[in-house]
Amino acid sequence: MHPPATVFSQITAGLYTLEFARCAEQFPMPRTSRSFSAYDHFLALCFGQLTYRDSLRDIVTCLNARPRLQFHLGFRGHITRTNLAYANEHRDWRVFEAVAQVLMRRAQRLYHDESGDEDLPRVAFALDSSIIHLSLNLFPWAYYPRSKAAALKLHTLLLIRGSLPVWSTLTEATFPDMKMLDEIPVQPGAFYVMDRGYLDFGRLLRLQQQKAFFVVRSKCHVRFRVLQSRKVDKTCGLRCDQTIGLTTSWSRKSYDLPLRRIRFRDEVHLHSLVFLTNNFDLGPQVICQLYKRRWEVELFFKWIKQHLRIRNFFGRSPNAIRCQVWTAICSYLLVAIARKQLGLEKSLHEILQILSVTAFEQTPLNEVLAHDPLSSSTPNHHEAQVSLGF
């Protein structure tokens, strides 16, 4: 009787090797390596993410400490620091980006029936970006003039129901957020919730033309005339619900259709929020609640920066940085897929902590991650802030 697969290989089983091979074939290396394949490279970086390794040397030392189990982990090549460093430098990072897109589609299918607020639209996405700070001395190619340091920008489209990324890209830190509206995939009938950095009427018209809905926070310089005003319940913070038309020549040329304007007074922080949307069917409270759920994409960025390796990097080249960021996203998705398939109640943070010390164990994953009745059922305040609904 063969022993069970290792815990690490059970996690990576969420990605089929044939799917990875198809991604790798799209971006072949100039000179192929017989002793260290693209899949070995991917597994090594994911292993570093899931076991909290700080360098390539740490990854190689940890794996070579159990040489007899490397085959059971999924490795078929010769793992050395030189092989890893060469692969980070020369293997196209777009291989791992393509793998992440495959995993995003699989996770979205698994979480499409995730329970949530029944008043909110079933398909709603939050779009935002986050700066990944780098050391200017080590990464001078990523100079960011605004902070006089080095940085990259991670753009993510997050499915609100399930808190899962469905699309991501990595750009220079100076890339304007609003230009991402030209790149994101648009699904007819879906809602796209954004902050005011994405307020560009010409690009919002593209969403309108593709029969999608948007909710975006307005800026103070937007000029308009009120076409219709509806009554609102001011006891819940609403101040107005209006149909407006843009008045400046540039805005009318960019977006010549009516918009819905909703103003909400936040009594906790004592400031007003103004939202613009092209949806006239949902109640004003639902629109405000939908924008409030946009905060989940901020929690996603906070979570991966705290619990995955995208602060300490394994290489210094642009290719190495992108390989590491994409494998971090892949690791997040692999754990989320395993959690859904096994029907686990634990948060992603708890699962990662357990995986970090059980990667080599040859025990069924559902037994390793079984609920511990002695553990506290109430997470602390910090874990609640970054649980992302898992």
Image (cartoon, rainbow, N blue to C red):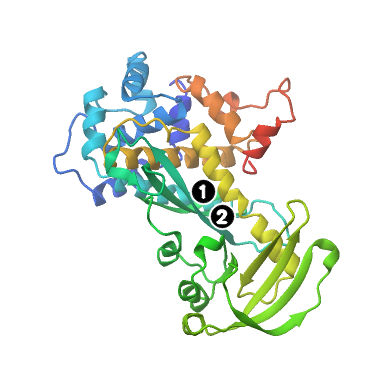
Q: Which residue is mark 2?
A: 159
- Quadrant including the C terminus: top right
Cβ atoms at labels 2 and 1 below 8 Å apart: no
Image quarter of the N terminus: top left
Q: Residue at x 51, y 26 (%)?
A: 355
User: In this rendering, is residue 182 above or below 163?
Assistant: below
Circle 2: residue type? Leu
**Mark 1, other Cα within 10 Å: few <14 / some 14–19 / many ≥20:** many
The percent coordinates of residue 291 (x first, y second) are: 65, 60
Which is nearer the eye, 364 or 288?
288
Q: Position of residue 189 (x, y in %)?
A: 57, 71
Name the residue carrying label 1.
107
Inspect this view and state whether residue 163 appears: no
Mark 2 or mark 1, which has the lower sequence index? 1
Q: Residue at x 66, y 74 (%)?
A: 261
Query: Quarter-wise, where is residue 290 in the image?
Result: bottom right
Q: Is residue 173 left or right of residue 319?
A: right
Q: Amino acid under label 1?
A: Ala
Q: SS at mark 1?
A: helix
Q: How many marks?
A: 2
In the picture as drawn, the residue positioned furthest to the left comes out as 31
The alpha-carbon separation of the residues under discs 2 and 1 comes to 10 Å
Residue 350: image x %, image y %? 60, 29
379 and 135: which is toward the camera: 135
Drawn side of residue 218 relative to residue 319, left or right: right
Q: Is residue 339 visible?
A: yes
Numbered disc 2: secondary structure: strand
Q: Is residue 263 above or below residue 48?
A: below
Seen as rendered, the residue at the extreme top is 65
